[in-house]
Image (cartoon, grey):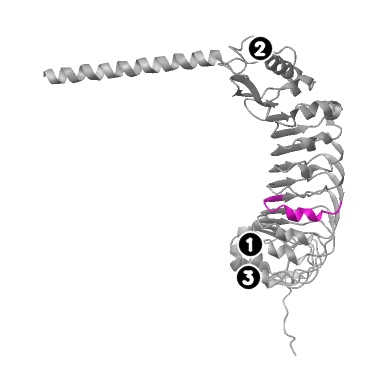
Amino acid sequence: MKMLRLRKKQHLFFLLCVWCLVVDLSKAEAEESEGVPMEKTEQTALYSTIQGFVGDSWNCSFLYPDPCGWTPIQGVTCDMYDDHWYVTALSFGTVQENSLACADVPVIRPQLFELKHLKSLSIYSCFTSPNRYLASVSDEKWVELSKSLERLEIRSNPGLIGELPSVITNFTNLQSLVVLENQLTGPLPENLAKLTRLRRLVLSGNKFTGRVPEVFGLTRLLILDLSRNFLSGSLPFSVGGLNSLLKLDVSNNYLEGKLPRELQYLKNLTLLDLRNNRFSGGFTKEIQEMGSLVELVLSNNRLAGDLTGLEWRNLKNLVVLDLSNTGLTGEIPGSILELKKLRFLGLSNNNLGGKLIPQMETEMPSLSALYVNGNDISGELEFSRKFYERMGRRLGVWGNPNLCYKGDKIKNLPFGVNQCKRVTADKN
């Protein structure tokens, strides 16, 4: 009994010691937090920057002991350098829950460029009123961020016009540059290849003009998206040197010329989207060397040629293949049955003839959308009732006047196909 009481006393004593230790550590952390100051110039620059974006009515009096202390500001991230707090990330707009909402007429104040440890800047849907100039801030100011900034994202600002500041090519520590869905114009900076640390380069959804700049040296790049602009000229051969690239999207531009043979060197590429351009000269056989491709989209170009020359079995990872409206001739080759993972096959609005391969139903088990409308495919449809029911509206075969189905009319028969005429023997 005495032994039991002794053990209880020892246990209580142990718990009391642990509680005292926790209290002491909490006090130490609080004292340390209170003891970590923010330079007055950094704090002033931050407050002025925020007020420029969200309005002068923004009040910082509630912050204690500073913007990076116990009550952090939404959209602001801090880190310690030389025993002081510094701002490392700013996010304006509503893209994230903790971002600061922008005023009706935000202003980029020069104090933004005094934040010498800023690594990330995001501006989302802030400049909505027309004719706000990104380039109204001088290059001399932007260059102040060139040594620290690693991520710059300017998205969905329909009122933001002007050119992309050429000084952006001096931001040699940038890993992500996203300038998406604004109204920026003019040519792309020629020296983008200086940004050798880039992993993501997205400049889509603007009004950029001119040629695609050379990209020699961007060997770390994973995503290159220049879609939905007004770019012209050919795709540079240097694209073939982007050996880490996973996604290449230059769709919806005015690019022309042949598909670069150098594309074959993109051994890690999973998406190649060149749709809605003016490429010509047929299919380069080097495409069949891109065995990592999951999506190949070349629709609405002037390529011409046929499909029989490609080794389709080399592209066995394809899930999406869209070659609609590319001037294809000849027949659909039987080798296309090698694409066992294919879900979407678009061959519409070409000049393809011959028959539709019935083995697509069994040999391509993943196929869930097939569009061959607007060709000259003939003969009988030989798919099963189950196939028609499974595909439904995702089977497009209309616009082939010599194509028909045999047998009685069945449910979910594709639109625009007539029943084959029955031939009866003449009676003497």
* Residue 296 relative to residue 387: left or right: right
The magenta segment is 233-247
* Residue 211 seen in the current view: yes
Tag 1: amino acid? Tyr
Circle 2/circle 1 CB separation < 8 Å: no
Residue 244: % across, % down:
67, 51
* Residue 133 seen in the current view: no
Mark 3 element type: loop
Q: Nearer the viewer, mark 2 or mark 3?
A: 2
Q: Give the crowd class for mark 1: few <14, some 14-19, many >=20 residues within 10 Å.
A: some
Q: Give the numbered dot on residue 388.
A: 1
Circle 2/circle 3 CB separation < 8 Å: no
* Residue where numbered disc 2 is placed: 60
Tag 3: amino acid? Gln
* Residue where numbered disc 3 is placed: 359
Cα distance between the residues tagged 2 and 3: 69 Å
Tag 2: amino acid? Cys
**Where's the N terminus, which quadrant?**
top left
Which of the 4 image quarters holds residue 375?
bottom right
Residue at point 70%, 70% (across, down): 356
Q: Give the crowd class for mark 3: few <14, some 14-19, many >=20 residues within 10 Å.
A: few
Cα distance between the residues tagged 3 and 1: 14 Å
Counting residues from the start of the chain, the first of labels 2 and 3 encountered is: 2
